[in-house]
Image (cartoon, helix red, strand yellow):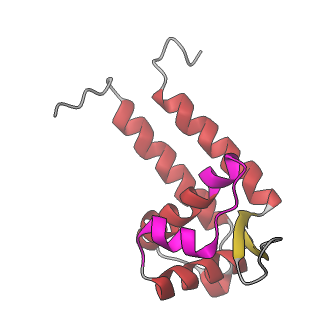
Amino acid sequence: MELNYREGELENLLKVRDRFVDLLGQYSIESTTLSRSKMLGTMFDTVFFIGISNLREHMPSVKEVYLNVGEARNKSLRNLELLEEMKIVTRIHDSNDSRVKRVKLTDKFRIDFEIFVTQWVDSRKPLAEST
């Protein structure tokens, strides 16, 4: 399989990803300061999955999160706890089944996430389209 990227496209994607990690870092509090490598891995995947789901007007269940991110259940639950402490996500009981918890971005982080997604999409446009 041959992958064709426009000149500078991969670099732009890396810059956008780095801005996302910087954004997560802004939400860090002293007790939950995370290493950059952890934010690039499981935290990025977790927040990105929840964010895209929320943009599609879906609040995934906690189980959906750990199954889609591919982490062990306990590790995924710990990541969700950290993200709640950082005020990035919130877990709420499902209105139809109180045993199920759904995950959504906080209002403040959702705004920042939408900006990130816009930048990410813009970085994929040919230069002529992004002006």
**Is residue 88 something that shows in the picture?**
no
Q: Say if 39 sits above or below 115 in the image.
A: below
> For the point 55% across and 68% down, which residue is it?
64
View extreme (top): residue? 128
Choose between 65 and 39: the one closer to the eye. 65
Choose between 112 and 18: the one closer to the eye. 112
- Is residue 67 rendered magenta in the image? yes
Choose between 60 and 81: the one closer to the eye. 60
Q: Say if 52 sits above or below 99 in the image.
A: above
Magenta segment, prevailing SS (helix, strand or loop): helix
View extreme (left): residue? 1
> For the point 56% across and 85% down, which residue is it?
78
User: What quarter of the picture does the C terminus occupy?
Assistant: top right
Q: Which contiguous range is marked in magenta?
A: 51-71
Is residue 35 toward the left or the right of residue 88 in the image?
left
Q: How many marks?
A: 0
> Based on the displayed image, in which of its 4 quarters is residue 118 positioned?
top right
> For the point 61% across and 75% down, which residue is it?
62
Q: Say if 80 sits above or below 9 in the image.
A: below
> Based on the displayed image, in which of its 4 quarters is residue 108 positioned?
bottom right
User: What quarter of the picture does the N terminus occupy?
Assistant: top left
Q: Position of residue 4 (x, y in %)?
A: 25, 26
**Is residue 38 something that shows in the picture?**
yes
Is residue 130 toward the left or the right of residue 28 in the image?
left
Is residue 85 toward the left or the right of residue 127 in the image?
right
Is residue 94 toward the left or the right of residue 67 in the image?
right
Q: Position of residue 103 (x, y in %)?
A: 69, 69
Q: Position of residue 72 (x, y in %)?
A: 42, 82
> For the point 55% across and 57% down, which residue is it?
48
- Is residue 94 rendered magenta in the image? no
Q: Position of residue 69 (x, y in %)?
A: 46, 66
Q: Say if 93 sits above or below 56 in the image.
A: below
